[in-house]
Amino acid sequence: MSFVQILEFNTKRAAEVESLMNEWRTQTEGKRHVQREVVAKHRDRPDHYVALVEFSSYEEAQRNSRLPETDRFNAHMVKLCEGPIKFSDYDVIRDKS
């Protein structure tokens, strides 16, 4: 069963967040377990974002979380955000295009 993690965060440093995400993708090439990621900016709430990160399973998401590069990413991401990052975990029950 697919698994999706949703991150909600506020930042005034969106370009730095984007750069950090790109850096993480480069550093984890060939070993990350992310199938897809989507980042969206809220239309009515300036500086509010969500990131939807899809994995083939919860177990793959856990393996991804244990990568040292993911730890470094999270530590830096916290510094770029105003307030805490909210993490929500979901099992995908329907996926249609």
Image (tube, helix red, strand yellow):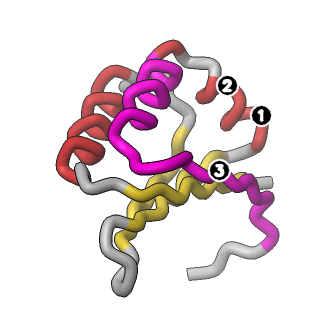
Mark carried by residue 63: 2
Viewer-side residue, 75 vs 58: 75
Disc 2 vs disc 1: Cβ atoms closer than 8 Å?
yes
Viewer-side residue, 4 vs 80: 80
Nearest to N terminus: mark 3 or mark 2: 2
Secondary structure at numbered mark 2: helix
Q: Residues within 10 Å of mark 1 (few under 14, many from 20)?
A: few
Q: Which residue is mark 3?
A: 87
Residue 39 lies within the magenta run = no
Residue 77 lies within the magenta run = yes
Query: For the residues carrying marks 3 and 2, which lies nearer the camera in this image?
Result: 3
Amino acid under disc 1: Glu
Mark carried by residue 47: none
Q: Which residue is mark 1?
A: 59
Viewer-side residue, 16 vs 55: 16
Q: Residue 30 occupies which quadrant of the picture?
A: top left
Nearest to N terminus: mark 1 or mark 3: 1
Q: Residues within 10 Å of mark 3 (few under 14, many from 20)?
A: few
Disc 3 vs disc 2: Cβ atoms closer than 8 Å?
no
The answer to whether 92 is drawn above or below residue 18 in the figure is below
At x 45%, y 36%, the residue is 78
Secondary structure at numbered mark 3: strand
Which residue is farthest bottom? 44
| Residue 9 locus on image (x, y percent) | 47, 56
| Residue 36 locus on image (x, y percent) | 48, 53
At x 48%, y 63%, the residue is 50
The answer to whether 86 is drawn above or below residue 34 in the figure is below
Q: Which residues are magenta?
A: 69-93
Amino acid under disc 2: Arg
Q: So how many labels did they put on this image?
A: 3
Describe residue 8's horizontal placement relative to residue 76 as left or right.
Answer: right
